[in-house]
Amino acid sequence: VQLQASGGGLVQAGGSLRLSCAASGRTYAMGWFRQAPGKEREFVAAISWSGGMTYYADSVKGRFTISRDNAKNTVYLQMNSLNSEDTAVYYCAANSGGRGWGTESRYDYWGQGTQVTVSS
């Protein structure tokens, strides 16, 4: 499985961005993680293979929405009401086991990351 994340950029506080993650090969439950400068990578959101179940970190609930289009083998992360604390490199990842969505070690495949910078 190869993952290609895109859609990052510079946005003002309060603005929105949509990240995309294109997958090649078999599809699985998918997640987004992020890593801010000087911090460890943290879980952001995850979605089941079917798209019927989603899971979010408390810090993004109500602001971010994860979705997927299996016909396009693509997962999206719609990010609204962005603030400076959302500045990070965002990574998409695939979880072949279908469990432990919030746990980084449960993810088998990782994309290269896309930078999101929120200016205040």
Image (cartoon, grey):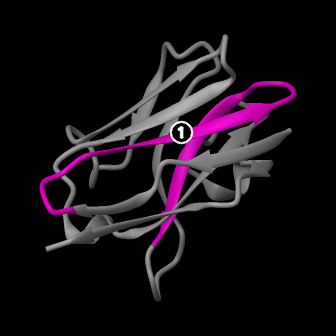
Callout count: 1
Residue 97, horizontal then vertical, whole percent: 77, 34
Residue 42 placement, left or right of 24: left
Tell me the quarter of the picture where residue 10 sits: bottom left
Tell me the quarter of the picture where residue 114 sits: bottom right
Q: Secondary structure at mark 1?
A: strand
Amino acid type, residue under disc 1 in the picture: Ser
Q: Is residue 51 above or below residue 28?
A: above
Question: Residue at position x 62%, y 48% from top?
Answer: 5
Residue 40, horizontal then vertical, whole percent: 52, 77
Q: Is residue 76 above or below residue 112?
A: above
Q: Is residue 89 above or below residue 36?
A: above
Residue 5 placement, left or right of 56: right
Give the overall secondary structure of the magenta segment.
Answer: strand
- Location of the C terminus (image quadrant): bottom left
- Location of the N terminus (image quadrant): top right
Magenta part of the chain: 12-35
Q: Is residue 15 above or below residue 99?
A: below
Magenta residue check for 76: no
Magenta residue check for 29: yes
Question: Residue at position x 67%, y 35% from top?
Answer: 22
- Which residue position is annotated with label 1? 20
Question: Residue at position x 12%, y 54% from top?
Answer: 14
Tell me the quarter of the picture where residue 2 sits: top right
